[in-house]
Amino acid sequence: MMRIRFTLSLMLLLMIIVVEKSQAQFTLTTGGAICASTTNQFFDQTAYKCDTCDSFYSGAGWERNDQNCTCGEGFRQIISTVGDGSAYTCTGCGTNEAVSRDRSTCMACPATAAYDTTTRDCVACPTNERLTERTATGVLLTNKTCTTCGPNSLGSTTNKYGCVACPDSRMEVVGGLCTCPTGYTLFSGKVCIQNTRYNDFLAQYSNEALTTIAYNYVTDENGLVSTKTVTSSFRMNELLLPNAVACSLASSTNHAACQAVANLCVAQLYDTNSVPCQIYKSLWERASTTSLNGWEGWNQDFPWIYHATPGSDTTQTSFLESSPLTLDYSFGTRLQLKLLSYTLNGTFLGLDYVTNELTLCDGQDVELTKWMEVGVGKTIACNLNLYQFYSKPLPQVYSLFIEDASGALYPIPVEITNLGSTTLYRSFMTYDNAFSTISSTGRPTIARYLSHADLSFELQANAPSKIRIPTLKLTYEDRDISALTSAPDPNYHTTELTTVFSPYVSFESNYFMNYTTHWITLGILSGIFVVIAIILTIVQMVFFVLSRDSFLVDVEFILKFINRVCDNVGNAIFFAVVCMCMYWYWLFKHAVTISVIPPARGTDLIPYGVFVGIAWLFKAIDLGICIGRQLLHQVFFIDWEKPIVGRLREQNIIRRRRQAKDGENEESRAKNVQQKRSTSRKRRRRGGRRTSEPKEENEPVEEPPTPDTRRPSTQSDSSSKNEEDEDKNRDFTNPIRSYYSSWRLISAAREYLSLYPTRIVNFDVTFLLLVMIMYGGRLTYLGNQTHDHTNLSHDVSENPILQFWALAQFWILLYVLQYLLNVFLIFPFWYDPVRAFIKRVGESNISVFALLDHSQGYYVHGAIGESADVNLGNLHKDILHVKEKPDDKVLARSILGKSIKYAEQKKCFEMFLTRETRSLYDDEAHIAKTKKKETTSSSSSRFTNLMGPSARLHHFIMPRTQHTPMEMLDTARIKLNAALKMVIKKIRDSYAGAPSDTPLKDPIHDQLVSNRFGIPPFIRTLKADTLVYDRSLRFSNMFIRGLDIKFFIFNLLSYALLELAIPVTFVPLVVVWVMNKLIVFVATYLFRINLIQKSFIYERFL
């Protein structure tokens, strides 16, 4: 094994050595400028290093440049073969001979361009001539000659072998100079312009006005907009006046010049006060008045940049509404959009298909043109690097067209939102880095860029497969970049951060249709559902009235009506919205032909937001009322523990025994004292020595037997009374004689409090699963504005309606699965906190008396065992005895009477009280509360006087019950406990012990079919307190668990609303989760305060 390890290590070492040897390093030279410091070196671009000329040329006469070596002037190059390579030699030319440009031969100079011994070349030819070595076909001449340049050209001053054309084609060479013809004036040393028109323009406009450009939307770092003017614009001076004069000539057909004037008006954003737009309008008025192609404002032989008369507010809306496009589109079909392009000087560049010209952001053409697929909405955004404007090419002027099936082109109008009008234009620019420079080599001081572009396509209402002519909406911004002194990254077009020199720019494209029919349909569907909801509300209110013993329009009736209306109407609108969203999602995502496209963000979503907002408002009111009922409900814990009637009697017996013992001890002690005195006298008479008297010893007192406080006495006592008499005669003012264990009450109250935030469906688990599914599985992109449901990439804009249903369908699925799993599997067969609570309070002899409404609530019976204040062994025996061998005594304590076997299993009931019983409860509770408040106010005033202003804040935050002395709470609780025991006993005693022929009339009966559908017993007819077995555990309505479905709908609607305002899917979901946690937290705190106040339990125990 050691050999094998050694061999492997040696092989690995050898491999490392071989690899390192094979990866020979070399020094990389980045350019010829580094080699220029050494005179005999040049940069070899194939080897990326500097090399010497000596390695190629032998002898003298050679010279080098940055990237090559060659023979110098006066030397010709001779190439000879040496082995597999070539050798180069430079040989000098003869007297008065100059070498050719390719260094292949020596040639004599012409007479008019003699040989220069200094430069070793011919001198320059006369002004309008140039040196020539070859014929027109490229054949080398014998001698160099001087050839005349063209009629409007001069010999170059920098290159004697070339000619330079005059700046203007109309110039003539006179005396060696380019001269404008008669009737023309040289402008800026470059252009010949007609004198008459030139003087007309100078008479109408000043030189400053002709070279001024205004930037009206300069935005600073604080977002404030101002206007800045460049008064000596180099481009405006170069282009405006010459082209205006050329275009204004009556006989002129110089389309480029007219287009240049139009381009300058476009650069001024069609500002009617600008000189270029005023000149354009005056030239348009002189042009032919014939409308070209049936368009107003499109004149013959003149550029078309307005959709109507220049300077007017009218638009060609009839053209947009007529929808001349006849091509039928389907999902996935690409639009054929073309751009007509011009340079600033009016040169026509061509008509090409659109790629990335409409956005200033970088990216692949496939991604940047994704929006041209029918039905795909997309937003392209980035932070534009303004440093690049120094080196960015000059802008171009575009006109956008859409191609129809026949190949015909239809112009797409342009709306500039900065102007605040609906005037439509034809041409536009995406940026401007040209007109704020003041010289040909100067840098721009103000950059104009397209901050936002919107190109949305509307489907025809009567034929969704056809689209209307869209409108390109543009928004521009200007930034002052004169403060930029250097460009750290001029080659990068975008940056990651948004700053004043890297502003945010975007392009957005969407597809939409006329949604009037859809919103009317949604309104009708919501109306039908609302009518059903109102009918259901009326039926529910009728049942509610019948469940009360009298008809009374009180506060409870009004709140119940509002609650039912908001619940049912909110559910109706919610279901209508869900149906519409599902309809849009499935027809858009899974259809081949175009039938519907859901509305994207903007004004089209306002009706959707209104419907969602109304549904959310109704559900918010419904949920608020339901939570308020829970937080203000009446609750009390009835203790059925049997009193220990023998304790006082046993104490009296023990006291008498002690008194008898004390009497016997006194008599014996007297005899001993008498005997001692007699003995002492005898000793003194005898004269004997006095001895110490023995100490008195107390006789042991018989300790009384300790009473068994674990179980109540079962001995029959003729002097004992029944429980009712004991309750009536008990001294409630002495809490030391309380006959129940406080810890059983505290335990029940704590568990009751812990039940409040419980839910059937755990929202935290749902939230985590949604995050895992939607973001871990990238399913959040199902809500993108694309028909392809398999496209789970982020390159397409998201749609609020599609996003809502994409999340809602998984949310509903998770909710239903958790609901079914808990209700039908986990709760029945594993653990249900509500059932566990009902079971435990029953075993502790504690009943729960809870009123959710004025006379309707729930009762959990706990008087099952004989006693619960015992040790665990005896308690276990009692429970087994109750469950396995229920005798008459056990059944008598149950709520259903002696004749019902296993009656202890039915412990939870819906409770319907008469107004008389409720008044009795209110009276007893009022007496208890009055006594408590009297003590509370006195102790609270003492506390406030001691602590000052901070005590008032303390009283406001904490429940007042905690300031009440515990003994007073105990007294109030005992009194209310006795009263409620009497109420329950009255209901139990009125029950015959077995169901009658008409169970609806029984004061206690099982849950019937009518009860399952929410029909309560008709207390108004029965006029009696009634308990209905709560088989469906509607007792959960006391807690958040009973509001689970309401919370579910409320959460979905909250997400839908937030998603309209916050386009990031994860953020609205987190906000909904935080909102839920906050609501449950605050409600639980207030529920605890209500429990403290209503159950008379000291605050420190809860």
Image (tube, rainbow, N blue to C red):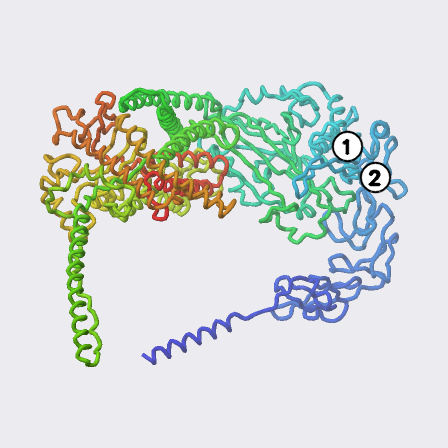
Q: Answer with the quarter of the image where residue 3 lies.
A: bottom left
Q: Nearer the viewer, residue 648 or 875?
A: 648
> In the rendering, at what x and y percent does residue 665 appear?
17, 62
- Tell me whether the residue at label 2 lies in contact with that at label 1, contact meaning CB atoms closer than 8 angstroms: no
Q: Which three-letter amino acid code belongs to the residue tagged 1?
A: Asn
Q: Tell me the tag on residue 39.
A: none
Q: Residue furthest right?
A: 175
- For mark 2, does the 10 Å Cα neighbourhood hold few (<14), some (14 to 19), or many (20 or more) residues? few
Q: Sequence-wise, which precedes: disc 2 or disc 1?
A: 2
Q: Which three-letter amino acid code belongs to the residue tagged 2?
A: Ser
Q: Nearer the viewer, residue 76 or 3?
A: 3
Q: Please indicate whether residue 666 sits to the left or right of residue 1079 in the image.
A: left
**Looking at the image, which residue is at 75% across and 65% down?**
63
- For mark 1, does the 10 Å Cα neighbourhood hold few (<14), some (14 to 19), or many (20 or more) residues? many
**Looking at the image, which residue is at 22% across and 76% down?**
692
Residue placed under numbered mark 1 in the picture: 243
Residue placed under numbered mark 2 in the picture: 188
Estimate the spatial distance between the alpha carbons at disc 2 and disc 1, rounded to whole Å: 13 Å
Residue 911 visible, this orientation = yes
Q: Residue furthest front?
A: 685
Q: Please indicate whether residue 4 sits to the left or right of residue 898 in the image.
A: right
Q: Secondary structure at mark 1?
A: helix
> In the rendering, at what x and y percent does residue 156 appear?
82, 48
> In the rendering, at what x and y percent does residue 641 appear?
20, 44
Q: Secondary structure at mark 2?
A: loop
Quick one: quadrant of the N terminus?
A: bottom left
Count all numbered tags in the image, as a single digit: 2
Q: Answer with the quarter of the image where residue 221 lies.
A: top right
Q: Nearer the viewer, residue 120 or 331?
A: 331
Q: Nearer the viewer, residue 138 or 703?
A: 703
> In the rendering, at what x and y percent does residue 948 appear?
51, 46
